[in-house]
Structures are given as structure tokens and as C-alpha cells.
Amino acid sequence: QVQLRESGPGLVKPSQTLSLTCTVSGASITTHYYYWNWIRLSPGKGMEWVGTIASVGNTYYSPLFKNRTSISRDTSKNQFTLQLESVTPEDTALYYCTRRTQGPEYDYWGLGTQVTVSS
């Protein structure tokens, strides 16, 4: 059974860098044709795609976050990590990591982790 689990701080101060890690079990993040994603859900904005790291390591970012977002991975731990720089209260959201195969839908989701940006 594929499982994804987000981890990271629940509270981040404005202007700091948010770092979240997704630990994957039951599947390898290097298996071809899998795409590993970060998305977030916030009141008023709905669901937003933040970025993706493909099984071969290529990264893709939403234009909304491109200039301050990076996604990396640790294949030895089967984890991938989101870093979002210069956060503001607008970045307060429930952050999910997900998996997508070659279709448009996410087939596995983590439970989500709430991140609040506040001083």
C-alpha cells in the first residue's frame, strides 16, 4: 500500500523559509512515470498546485510560486522536500504531497499538514 506522509513545522514566521518533507512508503520515488507533487488548500484560494518532481528528478513549478520555490529529493530515504522562501500570511494553508502517474489525477495523497505563517 502506497502511503505518503508530510512533516514539517506547523508555524513559520513571515519572511522565513518553509520546509516540508514528504516520506513515501510502498513505492519508490524513482520509479518511472511517477510524478510527486506539492499542492495546498487555503480558504478563499481553493486548491493550488505548488510544484512537482518527476521520477527522473526534473522539477516543475507553478508560476505563482516559481521564483521562491524549490523541490528536492533524497532517494536514499525515499523523500522529497518542498522549500518555499519568503513566506507571508498568504502562504497559510493545508499542504499535501501527492502522487500522479501519467494521467491528470492524483492517485495517492498524504493526510496533509497545516502550516500557519504568523509572527
Image (cartoon, rainbow, N blue to C red):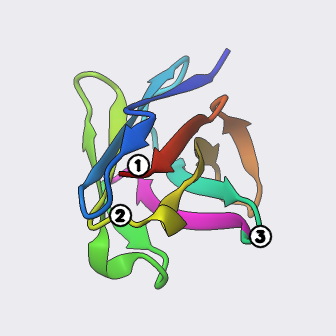
Task: Tell me the amino acid under the disc marked 2.
Answer: Val
| Horizontal relation, residue 119 to residue 51: left or right | left
Q: Quadrant of residue 96?
A: top right
Q: Where is residue 64 in the image (x, y as percent from the top left)?
A: 49, 82
Q: Which residue in the protein does label 1 denote?
A: 55
Q: Position of residue 78 (x, y in %)?
A: 35, 27
The residue at the point 74 percent across, 41 percent down is: 107
User: At label 3, which amino acid type do we have?
Assistant: Gly
Closer to the camera in the image, 53 or 63: 63
Labelled pair 3, 1 in contact (Cβ < 8 Å): no
Between the C-alphas of marks 1 and 2, the distance is: 27 Å
* Numbered range of the magenta stretch: 46-56
The tag earlier along the polypeptide, 3 or 1, is: 3
Q: Nearer the viewer, mark 1 or mark 2?
A: 2
Residue hosting label 3: 44
First in sequence: mark 1 or mark 2?
A: 1
